[in-house]
Amino acid sequence: MKNIFIVLMLLIAGISSAQVTVKGVVKDSIGDTLELANIIAINKETKAMASYAITNDKGVFKLDLDKNTVYTVQVSYIGMKTVSETITTKEEDLTKNYTLQNDNALAAVELTYEMPVTIKGDTLVYNADSFKDGSERKLEDVLKKLPGVEINADGQIEVEGKVVTKLMVNGKDFFDGDSKLATKNIPSNAVDKIQVLRNYSEVGQLSGVSNNQDNVAINIKLKEGKENFWFGDITAGTGVADNDGLYLVQPKLFYYSPKYSINLIGDMNNIGEVALTNRDIRNFGGGFRSPSRSSGTNINLGNNGLSGLTNVSNAQKVETKLGAANFSYAPQKNLDLSGFFIYNSSRLRTREESYVRYTDAELGIPDEETVQIGKEASNQALAKLSATYKPNSNNQLDYDLLGRLSNDTEVQDLFSSVVGSTNQVDKVKPFSINQNLSYYYTLDDKNIFALEAQHLIKDEDPFYNALLVNDPTSDDDAFDNTAEGLGLDQNQFGYNLNQNRRIKSNQLDAKVDYYHILNNKSNINLTLGTILSKQEFNSNIFQFLDDGTFFDPIATLEDGEGNVLINQNDTDYNFSDVYLGFHYRLKTGKFTITPGFSLHSYGNKNTQFNETYKDNFFRVLPDFETRIQFKKSESLTFNYNMSNSFTDVTSLAEGLVLNNYNNIGYGNSELQNSLSHNVSLNYFSFNLFNYTNVFARASYSKNIDQIRSQTEFDNVIRTSTYFNSNFADESASVFGRVQRTFKKIRAGLNVNFSYSKSNQFIQDVRSVNESFRQSYTPEIRTNFKTAPNVRLRYAYTVTENNQGASSTTFKVNAPSVEFDAYILKAFTFRTDYTYTNQDDGLRPAESFQTWDASLAYRKDKDAKWEFEVKASNLLDIDSNISNGSSNISVYSSETFIQPRFVTFRVIYTL
């Protein structure tokens, strides 16, 4: 690995040293410097664009060109005549200054080549072809090459350090703006321009009175000829692995016209290549944003689905099916209709071996080794319909309806060195319906009204079954004490433990905003809003006996006050928040200052077994934001807010709940809210003159009356409840990213520091846990048009946990390399390799490697047919190693993965 790194660095350095720099200043006819003027250098012999530049705020530009070469240099600026000049580079750097004259005719300037990057107000426009080298296949391949743009570990697009909130194609939402579906499926050859819309507002009427500086959207402009007909591609593949056949079918079809669009995405394979994971589907919000998101109130409705479903990359065997359709239709200019449907099905087989060592010897918890073999089946469906009606510039009405349904099952065979063999089954069939209504009305130049309302209905019905070993003639079984506490019949050959649960949620979140514009520098915002939430929770634990009958046990477990807990729940929880908010927004020079507060009237009531617990109170939640806009592409933002957080019904229910066979919980009907103070400081700068992108964020949070758990251990089986801690928890983090482009090389560095201090309560003893994590990720990548490209990356992470007298330190080193080459204008070769080494300081360090590669052939860039051989897990490793530490333990897990796959694929491009 080290030798490869050195060779690649020498190659990059050699290519870069064969260039000279041409720099200078662009001015107008009266001598004023011109910012954002465009300069293009065209190779006289090859007629290809060799370099480009954009002047900074002092009119300075810089071009990197080959030595001893003749170029045509074009200098242009909106409203001025283009200057064109032939220059010849030698061995030394050159200085060239240009003066542009006004173009009184304002005729359109015909340029031979388009600028790779242009700026139009708050819109940054990339010309996609300027960054392609022929190896790209999907949109994400192009985005990775754009300065200032990143694809993060979750598959989201980040621009200037900000996550893109919406993605559109030709101005139409693509699956409600989901960026991952777009980047993985839209063909790169259909992309003409990539427009980055900074300070994006979905409602034009509110763009001047609300803070949109953190909102970034992307609009993909299609090439001419990719409208009014179908385009896309269809992939089919096959292969052999052990005794099983491999298959892959992935149609991606798109149709766009000025009036309507249709997008169809299909995927069926057993290779583990998926368009959307189960986690992506669960997090697919359909573009919904709660009206109360900035009110300071946070209420948790809980997630009682199978949140632990395995990622496909951690499975031994995978079969997936995906069908997705998206449409948009404009029957008239003032009405837009759109919607989507997504169906996702997966079947996984998993195997994991783990080891847990508890660091505090006084807890008396034995070390545990486990082997877990699982089968998972998931079927998920989402459907959404949307309508936007804009009869004129003063009115806008939006309505959205989103339905979600799933059917998930997880079966696990688990062996524990402490508990023995256990078979578990989890099933759940939840559904939800979410509706959103928004209306925006501009009365006149001074007064704007906005109504936002959202209604959510959820119904969840998880079922849990566990089969545990038991010898009725022995008292040595690890589960015996827990079984006795649960009131189980211990005269059975094994415990057949079951629990039914039902959680229903009904919530209305609505607000009315009034904006009064005082002048072009300031405005006032008044908000009247409410959150009304109702949750019902029912559960019961029962035991199937050896004779086939079932038994409702009576629990003998006690809480901290000696009260005997029960195995059933029947809880109704009602929450209300009525609030009035006031905000004042002022622009003065480079500063935008927005102080404000909200006054809340809270009401909580939960009823359990004919007993009612109430809590009504008032609270003022202040917030404050100041933004310093040094220039269009550089700002510093300070933000402070106080927030109130409320838990869901399952944390209030007093009866026992089986989270797992070794994790039993019960709630606290008298839980209060937790209050937090949150401070953040954000800085970003994007310099198109030297292509330097800097983003930094520092944040601090202090939680008061934090809801904490009190845990008791019996062997490795834990029983936990909740209470409001009088001790504050704190967390702080600093994140920074720097990117700089040097000619054809982009270098970057990500740095992350985080610190947290939390109070934990185990075996009636309070301890303070402090955790410090630091990570460094330098990388370097090339962006040559004709030469192969490489990306070198090194990730280093150190995590330290301190609890009382015990401490653990965990280190991860992960160098990686990606390489792609477009060979003979017909072959595309790609490969990526990662070496991961992990060390917890207690056991010998462990490591694993991943290596994938592919070779594709198509006659030329416009060819309809392409043939590809793709290999995954080339080293045929059995498993990935994952080590880590928590506040009381260190753990190591070995996750078995799919073997080496080699597949042959045929791709047909429409």
Image (spheres, rainbow, N blue to C red):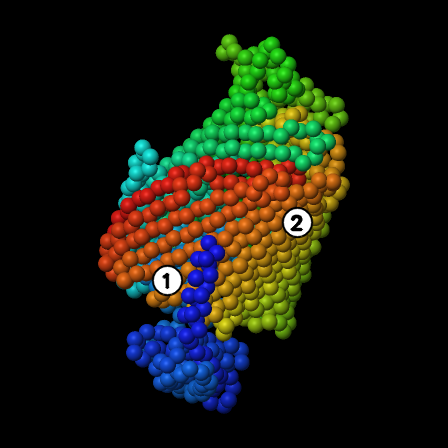
Between circles 2 and 1, the one closer to the viewer is 1
| Separation (CA) of disc 2 from disc 1 | 40 Å
> Which callout, 2 or 1, points at the residue further toward the start of the chain?
2
Whether the residues at callouts 2 and 1 have beta carbons within 8 Å, the answer is: no
Residue placed under numbered mark 2 in the picture: 772
Q: Amino acid at mark 2?
A: Phe
Question: Mark 1 — residue?
Answer: 788
Whether residue 806 can be seen here = yes
Residue 649 in the figure: left or right of residue 854: right
- In this view of the protein, which residue sits in the foreground, 526 or 314? 314
Q: Secondary structure at mark 2?
A: strand
The secondary structure type at the circle numbered 1 is loop
Rendered image quadrant of residue 383: top left
Percent x, y of residue 579: 65, 49
Q: Can you give x and y, in whole percent of width and height, for residue 639 in the image? A: 65, 59
Residue furthest to the front: 3
Residue at image coords 59%, 37%: 891
Q: Which mark is residue 698?
A: none
* Horizontal arrangement in the rendering, residue 46 relative to residue 201 (left or right): left
Rendering coords of residue 350 (x, y %) = 45, 33
Q: Residue at x 70, y 21 (%)?
A: 564
Q: Nearer the viewer, residue 429 or 699?
A: 699
Q: Give the image location of residue 245, x and y in percent.
A: 30, 36
Let me know if residue 301 appears in the view.
Answer: no
Would you place residue 808 above or below residue 856 in this image? Answer: above
Residue shown at 34% from the left, 51% from the top: 854
